[in-house]
Amino acid sequence: MTNLAAKIIKKITNARRKAFEKTLPKGKTVDDAINEEVAKLKKYVIFLENCIEFFFNTEKAIRIKINDIETKTNQEIKQEQLAKEIWILRYAFLYSLFFEIKTPKNENDTVENDKLINHALQNILNKEGKNDYLPWLQDGLNIFIDHPLNYNDFQSEFPEKIGEKIPLIAFECTGGRLGGESHDGILELIMTTIEKDKKFFLHGDIDALTGEETENVKKVIEDLRETREKAAKDFFN
């Protein structure tokens, strides 16, 4: 019975291989196609590893800026919580950006993208000796991404989830402040960090933000401030 099953599987596999061969350009073998696909996926993994390595390379600078905000404002900040929250946001945005350049055509593509990002993360965590990051990174990512991952749901829901989460981070990490220097300083740090990540992802550019990009960050913070003030007035009225 076992031998019969093995023969059947072999026949099916050979039939699929021959069917696939018919779709290939003349002179190209199935092995050629497989090797090309492996090389393509390897390039994606290397690219993602570079992005995640960039997160580690800039982590110290971000922690210094968090401390600077606390020192400048003389207002306590939950520094470790904020550092982790920013890490989670960066990782969530990596998903968003990667899915934009490698847009899945079907469920298999979605699963493939998810595996590529996870594989790249695990490689870098191993390299940096930071495997203890994995549990809280995955827990944090679950706020933005449901697994099994549905690309259409993720694409439509991600902006709203991010819009809700960023002000909440500033609120929680300042001990419940709805505004003020430390609150707005955190918002600016988050927004500028994400803008720099985007520049690195798209262009490999790690220079300072341009004047226009800085103004965009300030505009977002100002819009959030106006929304917050309106909500407060509505509440008291």
Image (spheres, helix red, strand yellow):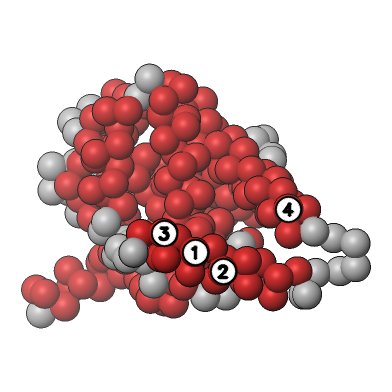
Q: Nearer the viewer, residue 56 or 27?
A: 27
* Label pair 2/3, CB-CB below 8 angstroms: no
**Residue 204: assigned label:** none
Specify which label sits upstream in the sequence, 4 or 1: 1
The CA distance from mark 4 to mark 1 is 22 Å
Check disc 2 and report the residue beneath it. Answer: 11
Res 186 visible? no
Of helix, strand and loop, which one carries label 3? Answer: helix
For the residue marked with disc 3, what is the amino acid?
A: Asn
Specify which label sits upstream in the sequence, 2 or 4: 2
The CA distance from mark 1 to mark 3 is 6 Å
The CA distance from mark 3 to mark 4 is 27 Å
- Mark nearer the viewer, 2 or 4: 2
* Label pair 2/1, CB-CB below 8 angstroms: yes
Q: Is residue 71 left or right of residue 100?
A: left
Check disc 4 and report the residue beneath it. Answer: 31
**Residue 3: assigned label:** 3
User: Residue 23 occupies which quadrant of the picture?
Assistant: bottom right
For the residue marked with disc 4, what is the amino acid?
A: Asp
Check disc 1 and report the residue beneath it. Answer: 7
**x and y percentages locating residue 64 in the rendered image:** 39, 23
- Mark nearer the viewer, 4 or 1: 1
